Image (cartoon, rainbow, N blue to C red):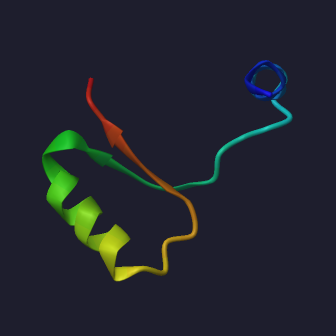
Amino acid sequence: MLAELTALAESGSLRPVVDTVRPLDEIAEAHRDLEAGGVRGKHVLQVA
């Protein structure tokens, strides 16, 4: 199954839903948002 998911992601057929992109120093705020609920996608932390 993992190989199938990998192939779908590489082909662009499977894409994650991103709700918010934040710098790493805002990790506490991101965690609070997730705990509060109502998030419709992934929260992404930028590390570079």
Q: Is residue 44 left or right of residue 33?
A: right
Residue found 13% across the figure and 45% down from its top: 25
- Which is more toward the observer, 46 or 39? 39
Residue found 78% across the figure and 29% down from its top: 5
Question: Taking 28 as reference, is 15 above or below it?
Answer: above
Could you say which quadrant of the image residue 23 lies in?
top left
Q: Is residue 20 left or right of residue 35?
A: right
Q: Is residue 41 left or right of residue 16?
A: left
User: In which quadrant will I find the N terminus?
Assistant: top right
Q: Is residue 45 left or right of residue 19?
A: left
Residue sticking out furthest to the front:
1
Residue found 27% across the figure and 23% down from its top: 48
Question: Taking 35 as reference, is 25 above or below it?
Answer: above
Query: Residue 18's spot in the image, x, y percent?
Result: 55, 52
Q: How many marks?
A: 0
Residue found 18% across the figure and 53% down from its top: 26
Question: Taking 38 as reference, is 8 above or below it?
Answer: above
